[in-house]
Amino acid sequence: MTATLPQLRLTRPPATIAERAPRRPISAERVAAVLTLVAILALAVAALAEVDISIVDMIGSWANAERFFARVGGVTFPPAGELAYLIALTLGIVLTGTLLAAVLSIPIAYLAASNTTPGNAWRAAARFAGVLARALPDVVLAMVFVLMFSLGALPGILAIGIHSIGMISKMFADAVEQIDEGPRLAIRAAGGSRLQEFTSGVLPQVLPSWVATVLHRNDINLRGSVVLGYVGVAGLGLEMSTAFKSLDYGRGLGIALVILVLCIVIEIVSSVVRAAMLGAAGDRRTWVDRVLHRRIARPASTRDAAPAAPGWAASPASAVRRPWTGERVRNVAAGWVAAALVVAGVWVCQIDWADFFTVWAKIPAVAVQFWPPTFGVYGAEVLFEALRETIAIALAATLLTLGPSLLLGSLAARNVAPNSGTRGLARFLLVGIRGVPELILAIILIVITGLGMQAGTLALAFGGIGLLGKLVADSLEEVERGPERALMATGATRLQVYAGATVPQSGRAMIGHGFYMLDTNLRAATILGIVGGGGVGYYLLNASQGSNYGMVTAIVLMILACVLVVEGLAMWMRKVFR
């Protein structure tokens, strides 16, 4: 009897490592979030079934495209001088509008970032301003500014600028929240003002990311500028819409081809510049880093052991007199080129600055035309059904985008791709896909499949692969290397490392990217409806052309409500899964 208790203790099996490991409690909020994701996925599957995409029917409908191109004849282009001017004007409008958005986004991002905002009320107001700017379609903004300023370049600049504030300010604020707080707090401890904290402690850390964000938004604005021509904004978009409306399909397709080539070229140039500015050292460096930043390309041991490069600051006196190294020459030259492009872009737009002083008198008359909202002759039932179609198109396109984006994005990530050749090919494909404007792709698909939801869904799904694939690749490359190396040390295969360490670490970012893709598709589906891609865009175009601006307001408010719901879900998901 005396040895019973010790014997029981000795015979009890020891706890395994899995049993001793701490278990994260499952909260009701997390369960609700998972169920919400499942419900959204089920709605996307139902939407895809409603769209009823049939590859067999598309192949059978190819005869429609053959008959169309037979009627078109050859592709024609405007005269060389006129074409060059249209290209310069379009680039000028896009560049100036993007720059305007970048400047206005700085104070909004400062107020929206949790670590720089003066208070929660300021932060909520700034976040709402960004969401509102994203929710307002740029084509609607252009429509309003055409009424205020008449036809020309200025309505396009203002529409692109105000609409772009939403995304640029959001990315700016996210970058500010991720800074190293040390420099900013050190400036505060030394008695620096808020302005000094921002200019010396925050701005130097976020500037490369901000420039990359602006370049990325400039690419998106170039593709989106095509549709602005349908409401009177000058440039290639206006010429293309005029050609199609006058049944001059050869000229319209020629301009569409020019826009396609221009978008791909600008996308490649922007990608190279972004890679040069954001390339990181170590195993994340790119070929651009090795070309432009030779010190990064050298091994760490060599860098530590090597003496200071000629011209590096060895004393306070030498620090004051900065030498003209190759890197400094490149940076200064890039700065002057950027300034020259901005000046040229503003000049080619031929802005009448006096309009800004006379436009205020027109605002009351224009505002009266847009208020109160009305459903017009169609009625609420028709417009809400069209909105449901738009939501279905966005859900179906997002679902179709997920698989190819995950595949291409994984192959484009340095820590996942089996070799540099595969990664380079995947990156090239993503750049090429992003360069195709969804509007042009929708027009081609409408010729093949006819009007309706199918063309809009396929156009958004194809275009989304380039954007979401890039976001997936960036998220996979940003995960911590420790878990990956630990699995590799145990003999895990590449696929096991990918599934057990890489993907789980990027799960939260993947959910955020999925909601961002849904948000983008929701707004883009509205625009594609203008050319017959299904949804509420058809009624939006009819209302604008019939000067029924109260219906335009009603449609915009409906879209705004949907975007706010998606934004709220995305914020909730990021909080739950952090």
Image: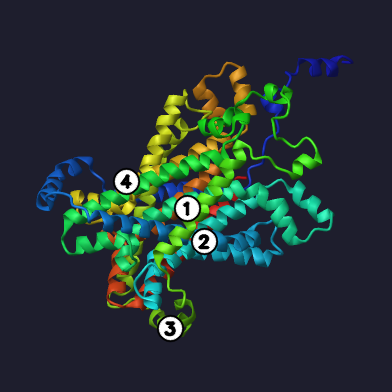
The crowd level at tag 2 (other Cα within 10 Å; few <14, some 14-19, many 20+) is many
SS for callout 1: helix
Q: Which residue is mark 4?
A: 261
Q: Which mark is residue 217?
A: 1
Find residue 108 and report its horizontal and vertical position in percent.
60, 63
Q: Which mark is residue 362?
A: 3
Q: Which mark is residue 101?
A: 2
**Between discs 3 and 2, the one toward the N terminus:** 2
Whether residues under marks 1 and 4 lie with C-beta atoms below 8 angstroms apart, the answer is no
Q: Is residue 200 above or below residue 379?
A: above
SS for callout 4: helix
Residue 48 in sight here: no
Residue 574 in sight here: yes
Find residue 354 and report its horizontal and vertical position in percent.
46, 78
- Residue at 48%, 65% in the rendered image: 162
Along the viewing direction, whichever of 109 and 576 lies nearer the viewer = 109
- Residue at 69%, 30% in the rendered image: 309
Is 98 displayed left or right of 232 in the figure?
A: right
The crowd level at tag 4 (other Cα within 10 Å; few <14, some 14-19, many 20+) is some
Whether residues under marks 2 and 1 lie with C-beta atoms below 8 angstroms apart, the answer is yes
Report the Cα–Cα distance between label 1 and label 4: 18 Å
